[in-house]
Image (cartoon, rainbow, N blue to C red):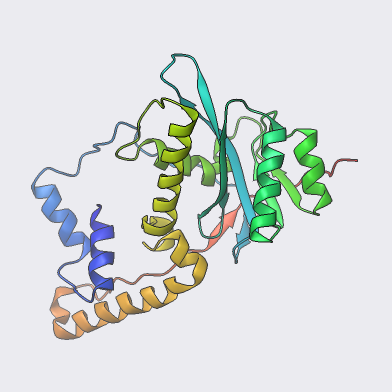
């Protein structure tokens, strides 16, 4: 785990040992701060004018990613829907081809199962995302559709970031032996992500805790522990800044399009 995650977990357990800066200083002395992942180092991007998302089931973002099979050049397709507010995966399916008909079936199942309809559904500009079958279904539920700008991948950053978390997690198979294998592994990962993954943008709580409202109590516990630690030894905070936890404001770039006739 990262130093930030460790400090957050210990504070939740009412056990303050050291600050993030101390943890990173120890890692730096041990020469353990270099980039260790196979992926490229993160780079900053320019954001356009955002919409603030204040509650779950308000904005969903979705996309399709390839899952490699053991046959070179053959792929399965993972359709995934993420709630922008709490980063939880609200629905997914894995099929052998890419089609807006499969996407429509997924949205039909999820909206009926959860008995909710988001205000906005965002996607990129792929054929399946702009297909008439899905568009007609979303329009029938009065769901506004939003699409990324051409050749601007970070307009759909929430789901793209999740795909990176998926494929760079420890234990990712790389290639799947069958559709059943892919679906079983994917189901286990989604459950783990929703209920056990401490998300940095959520103040190191899980998507499920953010969705249920439990996160606020966790933040309060951590912050109280940090205040108590400061009271026991204020000299450890030379600059007077005490670490606190809380959720960040969620901003989303909404680009509405006309409804289908």
Q: Residue at x 75, y 39 (%)?
A: 134
Image position of 72 (left or right of 94): left
Q: Position of residue 113 (x, y in %)?
A: 65, 56
To which quarter of the image does residue 137 belong? Answer: top right
**Of 90 and 146, which appears nearest the observer?**
90
To which quarter of the image does residue 102 belong? Answer: top right
Q: Is residue 35 above or below residue 111?
A: above
Q: Is residue 98 above or below residue 258?
A: above
To which quarter of the image does residue 34 belong? Answer: top left
Q: Position of residue 17 (x, y in %)?
A: 15, 70
Residue 49 visible, this angle:
no
Q: Is residue 7 above or below residue 260?
A: below
Image position of 143 (left or right of 60): right
**Of 116 and 33, which appears nearest the observer?**
116
Q: Residue at x 61, y 30 (%)?
A: 151
Q: Position of residue 69 (x, y in %)?
A: 44, 22
Q: Residue furthest front?
A: 180
**Of 34 and 208, which appears nearest the observer?**
208
The quadrant of the image that shows the C terminus is top right
Q: Residue at x 22, y 83 (%)?
A: 228
Q: Position of residue 106 (x, y in %)?
A: 65, 43
The number of discs equals 0
Q: Residue furthest right?
A: 261
């Amino acid at each position: 785990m990262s130093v930030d995650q460790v400090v957050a977990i210990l504070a939740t357990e009412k056990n303050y040992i050291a600050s993030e800066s101390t943890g990173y200083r120890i890692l730096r002395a041990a020469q353990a701060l270099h980039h260790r992942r196979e992926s490229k180092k993160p780079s900053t991007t320019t954001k356009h004018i955002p919409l603030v998302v204040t509650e779950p089931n308000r904005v969903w973002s979705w996309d399709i990613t390839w899952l490699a099979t053991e046959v070179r050049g053959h792929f399965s397709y993972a359709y995934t829907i993420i709630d922008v507010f709490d980063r939880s995966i609200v629905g997914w399916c894995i099929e052998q081809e890419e089609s807006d008909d499969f996407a429509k079936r997924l949205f039909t199942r999820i909206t009926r199962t959860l008995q909710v309809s988001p205000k906005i559904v965002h996607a990129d500009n792929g054929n399946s995302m702009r297909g008439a079958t899905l568009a007609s279904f979303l329009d029938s539920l009065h769901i506004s559709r939003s699409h990324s700008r051409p050749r601007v991948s970070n307009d759909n950053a929430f789901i793209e970031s999740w795909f990176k978390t998926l494929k760079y997690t420890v234990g990712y198979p790389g290639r799947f032996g069958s559709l059943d294998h892919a679906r079983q592994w994917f189901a286990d990962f989604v459950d783990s992500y929703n209920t056990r993954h401490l998300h940095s943008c959520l103040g190191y709580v899980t998507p499920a805790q953010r969705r249920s409202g439990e996160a606020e109590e966790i933040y309060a516990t951590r912050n109280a522990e940090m205040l108590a630690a400061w009271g026991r030894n204020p000299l450890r905070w030379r600059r007077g800044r005490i670490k606190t936890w809380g959720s960040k404001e969620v901003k989303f770039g909404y680009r509405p399009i006309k409804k289908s006739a």
